[in-house]
Image: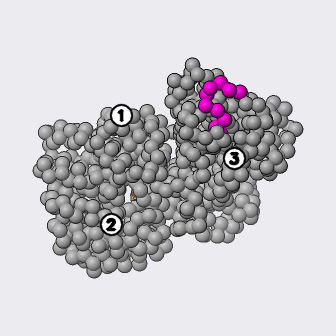
Amino acid sequence: MIYITTAMHCEAKPFIDRWNLKKDSASSIFRVYKNSDRILLITGVGVVSAAVGATYLLTRYPPRFGDMFMNIGICGAKDKDIKKGQAVLCHKIIHHDTGRCYYPDMLFKHPFLEGVLETFSRPVDKALRPSVEGDVVDMEGAGAYQAAERFLSHGAIHCIKIVSDYLEGNKLDKGQVTDLIEGNVPAVSRWISVVEDLLPLPEPLFTKEEEEYLDRVCQNLRLTVALKHQLKHLAGQYTVRSQDLVEALKPFGDIKCTSKNEVKRYFEQLKGRLMEY
Amino acid sequence: MNSSKDGLWNTDFSHIYVERKAADHPRAKRILSRLKNSRLIEIGHYKDVFCRSRQSFRLQKHSPKLILAVKEGNLLYKGARVCQDFGNHHFYYTSCVMNCPYDCEYCYLQGMYPSANIVIFVNLEDIFLDVEKLLKSHPVYLCISYDTDLLALEGITGFVSSWLGFASRHDSLVIELRTKSANFNAIKDIPPLDNVILAWTLSPVEVIHDYEEGTPSLQARLKSIKRAVDRGWKVRLCFDPIIFTRDWKRQYGACVKEVFEELSPDSIHDVSLGVFRISKEYLKRIHKDRPNSLVFAYPFEEREGVCTYSSGHTKEMRDFLYSEISRYIPGDKIYF
Ligand code: SF4
């Protein structure tokens, strides 16, 4: 699953259209749009909104290993060398107010410009401009990152910002914002697909049959949570060694323990069997 | 294990994180001049990147980054219990580099460090000062390539040459440089030193192929060793860790034979043997990260916080290797 947050609907619209995302009516607090493998949430403007929105998204729709989170939106650039409409993949995100920095792992090749993003709590105008350390500035990136790093590893969190202005206080209308994002949707979308393919999926240790057999044995032997955990660990190692787990479990399949002593005895026997190498 | 996806990952060291206080250090500048295509990212402290929580060691190994930092606080450590001291009382190690460019499946570093990125401490001179302080009270036996492979990184760091220069000025210091690399070339012009031991870790071809991703072949390592002994260096052979496989006896038997067909036993300073062992805590972390690893699917036995093979397997493997090696090397030169 790919998780996306944007601050405004006009930033999200090109992605909603591209991926044919449908509004999730189950979410009443934030506007959420999704299909089977993409989910997008509109957080509202500002660093706190970005953090709250990302937290809501990743809590309500919990990610798994191999999923990716991305914060996308427009930004201002300090330097006019960076063209309007240019997408910047951020390799460092500074939260201006706290001075805290975030570092997405730059593991994947990409077609974007790279730079440092600085997130401010209020719009950066000419007066604030001298205090800018980053190459580009926004009002969400650091908040979204701080929330997402609670859920995902740093190689699976990214921030792409599209340059809309040069911090001179000019306001863009919604249509102009959508156009700027729209121009980058093909490249961003292609890159997301590449990364999605590279992020490893969890490899299940057990087949369905093995899983069922294990559950049955745990239940019949009346194993405690700790013993169950130990058994699953040993069973996992047993299968990795290409040994036939179901065959090893079979003698214990129909045993039903009625006392603590029995549990202990049969568990030790089973453990011994699974430790054979 | 090249795949069509390899070209989609950034190259190793595509990005270098540089601590502000390290940036102007001459060694940092030298390292950066050797990696001109890397992007630099300024950081406050190396721990801001290296010690973040929720890093994926496995993912990062696809494209590890460098971190240039200044080491503060303790720079020398007393040798750990799981390490061989070769009869030396004052046994220390130092980590001027944390993490390794290779990716051995059994490597304990993946349980020890939160990150696969490589930290290079550029202020080697501070470590030298600490060693000199110790040398005032007693001789020192110092392992300089634990928790990394310094010779493999020599083209980037030049640290081995610096250490050899330091060793040449301190007779009561003995240095062990452990490596799996085939990079003797990097120090070929330095005259051999009596107080330096170049220690090569050797494994059967099958173990190298299956479990030592990115490392040079056995033949390449042996070629490097041959050049080192021909040049007059003291060389230690380390069959450590010995890895249990279903076919370990044949694999290690063939390995020992190949090694001594290639190298003259008289030219070898000594040999070290050790079966695979790892701290319980590291093992727990690694299990989580690589549940499908065959190396870690062994039902280990734990003794005082250290996990290793069953005492039966341990004895069998150690005895076998000892008897094979003692055909070539006298018993008092084999440590285990
Ligand atoms: S060479 Fe040693 S330190 Fe490097 S990855 Fe292999 S086991 Fe780890």
Q: CA distance from mark 1 to mark 3?
A: 38 Å
Residue at mark 1: chain: B
Q: Is mark 2 within 8 Å of ligand 1?
A: no
Identified at 82% across, 46% down, the residue is A17
Q: Which image quadrant shows ligand 1?
A: bottom left
Q: Is residue A233 left or right of residue A40?
A: left
Magenta includes B200?
A: no
Where does residue A266 sit, x and y in percent of width and height?
64, 58
Q: Is residue B150 left or right of residue A94?
A: left
Q: Is residue A265 above or below residue A68?
A: below
Same chain assignment for discs 1 and 3: no
Residue at mark 2: chain: B
Q: Which numbered disc covers residue B182?
A: 2
Identified at 16% across, 67% down, the residue is B232
Disc 3 marks a residue whose amino acid type is Asn
Where does residue B288 sit, x and y in percent of width and height?
57, 51
Q: Which residue is mark 1?
A: B21
Residue numbers of the magenta segment: A161-171
**Nearest the camera: B322 or A157?**
A157
